[in-house]
């Protein structure tokens, strides 16, 4: 309890345990509430309170980690701060929580704990006076010297700050107007102090003890500001010593006896230039160049000294020497070889991509055992949007190296790689040497982006110029045409990215270690969206989780119904469209929580207002509106009707249609094959912009079916086993604007034609891939993982693949393998049996002999 003349806080207070800091009397702090006890306190006392006194709570520091919160109440700190909640903000995303803005009133001591559930309530004893201050006699007596010393340090600290800032100016005025006993808590919340130091200030109930504990903290802050000012002072002194000097005229005699007046500017320029050359020569000596490069530079600097400045070659030679000095001949960063930390960093930056992460960790492990390991040449191959470039940036961050990206898409001049010879006007080094100059170290991570899109022209082949750069056995002596001396690239970690290896020259591909980066499954996309894409878009659009909530059900709908891609680039654009629509709603009038007011003078003013109205009732406003939740109706309003709503079963509702699987540089895709027959002269028509290999597969398919028509009871419209007798066949591959080529559609064409001639429907949940031979064998194909992911995205349940591709199933994620039924086929008999419900009837060899007889 307190003095009879002072305002008293209630003798029983609900207790709020906080781990975020220490609240001091007269100060304001924002506290996040998410534990069970604190949530119950907010709901029961703050949201239902009818008067200002009912919103007074006790705030007690809790040093225990809230992640390990249990039902058992921890040991309470002996001293707390009674405070009043001036603002309550609620939200339900990512989990229900409240944010309280609390102003401290006074200290209290907990006498006993009255109850623990649903929230803690304690019997308290008030320690500070709310209205009364220390008597003038006491301040002038035993506390006079301490008070004056404290006040002197406080004024000195404030005077060292920028008085043009309004908060600092107001604080200076408050130092003169507020009583000295109210200043220690306010200053302790403003200066740099740890939580343990603030706890000591909180525990200092007596004013004398409080002065003694705070004066050393003020002294430490003042010394830090003095040291900061000393570091800035020399620069200011240098600026003051700049003096403008007029050029002095001199008189010179000519042979004719005439006099001429010349300014001293020319002589000064010559002196400055000679000084620059001397400084450049000094830099060359200290650049730690290898012996061949040093000899070239010394020779060029001697030529430069004898060369008039008016010669065009003077500037070229000087630029060359400056580049040689700036190159990192012997500068490198130290690799971070902590494998555990690297694993944590890679997992936090990128979800999935296990093969890439494994390769980076292997490199780190070998670097621990051998310091002079040559940098590997990695090539990430995969469809767009799967994160190949961002993985390269994460690898550089993991290793602690500098990162430099070189875009090679469309480059068609080999000088971009090797540089120009110095005999040409406007010559410059290549992108490799220029990148080393930019990063300033000899062991960066170089990302050669889009290496599969290099061009070729009359200026040479840049892909051939890359052979020396990307050869671990040769790049220790890479020679740029501009430098004309060898530079060691063996410590550079080169990472190339490509969508396909088909357009990379074989010689260049042989020098790189190819790592396939396939597309993501639907589950992986949802996880990536909530870990990376949604937080990134919220930050870019100025939104907070308290304003928009995208549940996993909405993300699943966006992935399956609005995007169908291997990567996540289109998915991120959809989230951007959602954020823009929500930003309009917020800007039109939704309540947005304002930022915290700065502590200090404002907190003191707020405390005075609280003291004035402490005994008067006031209503507490409810939390603002909850976040805008994205459901299916909101998605339709923002993104429009779903794009991928067509059911696959609708396309297979009649004979002569089958689904194949194709691989493209954009990832795996499903491909429909349609066939029809009509009266004619036995011609086979193919449409759909097919390549030569695809056309050969169609001819193989019709030839095999004609040779096995009796075996499978296949007849044309007239009942003849000669399928092309008076019959024309038209094979069509929809999406005719897309070029299609490759042998993997052979089994699909056979199944489509077998369905057409037998009149039976192919299973609607089935897709297939495989190359065929004239004898009916099914040969292996590539891209099994990408094709399986495409079938999974399309909602198919069964896939027929060649038996020799069974080894490729290990690369498919376990969740996808569990949803798909894989059928291994070694011949076309097994393909047809699996493609139709109930199998495909086959006439035995004995029946065939009897029919011939």
Image (cartoon, rainbow, N blue to C red):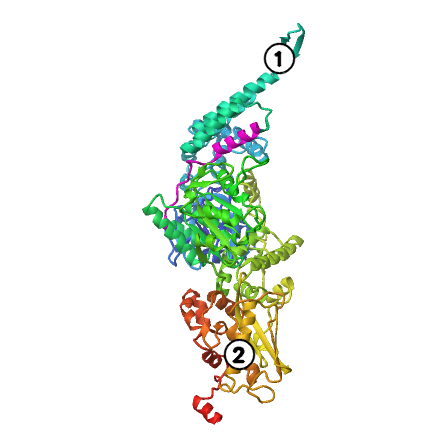
The residue at the point 49 percent across, 28 percent down is 300
Label 1 neighbour load within 10 Å: few <14, some 14-19, many 20+:
few
Q: Which mark is residue 248?
A: 1
The stretch in magenta equals: 313-340
Residue at horizontal 46%, vertical 74%? 778
Relative to 651, say whether 217 is above or below: above
Tell whether 554 sits left or right of 289. Answer: right
- Residue position marked by numbered label 2 in the rendering: 703
In front of the other: 403 or 377: 377
Tell me which label, 2 or 1, sits earlier in the chain.
1
The Cα–Cα distance between marks 2 and 1, rounded to whole angstroms, is 100 Å
Q: Is residue 617 in view from this perspective?
A: no
Q: Crowding at label 2, few (<14), some or many (≥20) Cα neighbours within 10 Å? A: some
Where on the picture, by quarter, is residue 442? Answer: top left
**Which residue appears farthest toward the left when viewing the image?**
369
Residue 427: tell me if it is visible. yes
Nearer-the-camera pick, 400 or 826: 826
Residue 69 counted in the magenta span: no
**Label 1 secondary element:** loop
Q: Residue at x 46, y 25 (%)?
A: 282
Residue 330 inside the magenta-drawn segment: yes
């Amino acid at each position: 309890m307190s003095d009879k003349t002072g305002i008293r806080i209630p003798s029983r207070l609900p207790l709020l345990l906080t781990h975020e800091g220490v609240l001091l009397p007269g100060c304001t702090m924002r506290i996040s509430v998410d534990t069970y006890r604190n949530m119950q306190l907010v709901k029961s006392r703050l949201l239902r309170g009818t008067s200002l006194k009912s919103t007074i709570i006790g705030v007690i520091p809790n040093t225990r980690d809230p992640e390990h919160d249990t039902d058992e109440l921890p040991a309470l700190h002996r001293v707390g701060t009674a405070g009043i909640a001036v603002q309550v903000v609620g939200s339900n995303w990512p989990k229900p929580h409240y944010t309280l803005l609390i102003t401290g009133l006074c200290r209290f001591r907990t006498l006993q704990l009255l109850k623990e559930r649903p929230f803690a309530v304690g019997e308290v004893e008030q320690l500070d006076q709310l209205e009364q201050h220390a008597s003038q006699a006491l301040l002038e007596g035993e506390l006079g010297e301490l008070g004056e010393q404290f006040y002197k340090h406080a004024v000195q600290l404030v005077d060292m700050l920028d008085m043009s800032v309004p908060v600092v100016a107001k604080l200076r005025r408050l130092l003169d107007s507020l009583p000295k006993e109210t200043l220690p808590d306010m200053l302790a919340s403003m200066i740099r102090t740890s939580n343990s130091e603030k706890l000591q200030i909180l525990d200092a109930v007596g004013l004398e003890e409080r002065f003694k504990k705070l004066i050393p903290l003020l002294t430490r802050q003042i010394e830090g500001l003095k040291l900061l000012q000393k570091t800035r002072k020399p620069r200011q002194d240098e600026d003051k010593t700049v003096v403008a000097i007029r050029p002095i005229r001199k008189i010179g005699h000519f042979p004719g006896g005439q006099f001429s007046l010349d300014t001293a500017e020319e002589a000064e320029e010559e002196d400055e230039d000679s000084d620059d050359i001397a400084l450049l020569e000094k830099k060359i000596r200290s650049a730690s160049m290898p012996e061949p490069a040093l000899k070239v530079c010394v020779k060029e600097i001697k030529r430069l000294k004898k060369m008039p400045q008016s010669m065009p070659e003077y500037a070229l030679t000087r630029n060359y020497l400056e580049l040689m000095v700036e190159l990192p001949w012997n500068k490198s960063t130290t690799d971070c070889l902590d494998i555990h930390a690297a694993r944590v960093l890679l997992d936090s930056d990128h979800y999935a991509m296990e093969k890439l992460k494994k390769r980076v960790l292997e490199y780190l492990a070998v670097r621990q055992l051998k310091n002079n390991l040559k940098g590997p040449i990695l090539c990430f191959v995969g469809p767009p949007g799967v994160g190949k470039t961002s993985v390269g940036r994460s690898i550089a961050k993991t290793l602690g190296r500098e990162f430099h990206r070189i875009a090679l898409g469309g480059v068609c001049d080999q000088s971009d790689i090797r540089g120009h010879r110095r005999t040409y006007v406007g010559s410059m080094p290549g992108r490799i040497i220029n990148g080393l100059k930019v990063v300033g170290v000899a062991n960066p991570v170089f990302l050669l982006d889009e290496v599969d899109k290099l061009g070729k022209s009359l200026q040479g082949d840049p892909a051939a110029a890359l052979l020396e750069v990307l050869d671990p056995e040769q790049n220790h002596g890479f020679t740029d045409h501009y430098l004309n001396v060898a530079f060691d690239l063996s410590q550079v970690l080169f990472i190339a990215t490509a969508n396909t290896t088909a357009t990379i020259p074989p010689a260049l591909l042989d020098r790189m270690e190819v790592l396939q980066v396939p597309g993501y499954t639907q589950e992986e996309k949802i996880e990536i969206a909530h870990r990376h894409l949604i937080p990134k878009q919220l930050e870019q659009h100025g939104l907070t989780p308290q304003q928009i909530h995208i549940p996993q059900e909405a993300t699943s709908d966006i992935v399956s119904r609005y995007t169908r891609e291997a990567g996540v680039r289109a998915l991120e654009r959809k989230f951007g469209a959602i954020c823009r629509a929500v930003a309009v709603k917020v800007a039109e009038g939704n309540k947005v929580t304002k930022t915290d007011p700065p502590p200090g003078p404002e907190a003191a003013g707020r405390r005075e207002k609280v003291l004035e109205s402490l005994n008067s009732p006031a209503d507490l406003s409810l939390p603002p509106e909850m976040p805008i939740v994205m459901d299916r109706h909101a998605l339709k309003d923002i993104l429009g009707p779903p794009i991928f709503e067509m059911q696959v079963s609708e396309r297979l509702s009649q004979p002569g249609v089958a689904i194949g699987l194709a691989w493209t540089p954009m990832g795996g895709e499903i491909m429909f094959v349609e066939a029809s027959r009509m009266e004619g002269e036995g011609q086979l028509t193919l449409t759909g912009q097919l390549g030569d290999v695809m056309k050969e597969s169609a001819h193989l398919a019709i030839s095999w079916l004609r040779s096995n028509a009796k075996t499978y009871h296949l007849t044309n419209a007239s009942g003849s086993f000669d399928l092309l007798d008076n019959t024309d066949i038209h094979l069509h591959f929809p999406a005719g604007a897309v070029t299609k080529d490759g042998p993997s559609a052979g089994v699909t064409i056979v199944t489509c034609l077998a369905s057409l001639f037998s009149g039976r429907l192919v299973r609607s949940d089935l897709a297939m891939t495989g190359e065929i031979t004239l004898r009916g064998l099914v040969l292996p194909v590539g891209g099994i993982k990408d094709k399986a992911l495409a079938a999974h995205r399309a909602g198919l349940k069964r896939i027929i693949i060649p038996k020799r591709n069974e080894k490729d199933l290990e690369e498919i994620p376990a969740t996808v393998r569990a949803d798909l039924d894989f059928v291994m086929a070694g011949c076309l008999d097994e393909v047809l049996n699996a493609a139709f419900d109930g199998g495909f009837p086959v006439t035995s060899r004995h029946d065939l002999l009897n029919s011939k007889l």
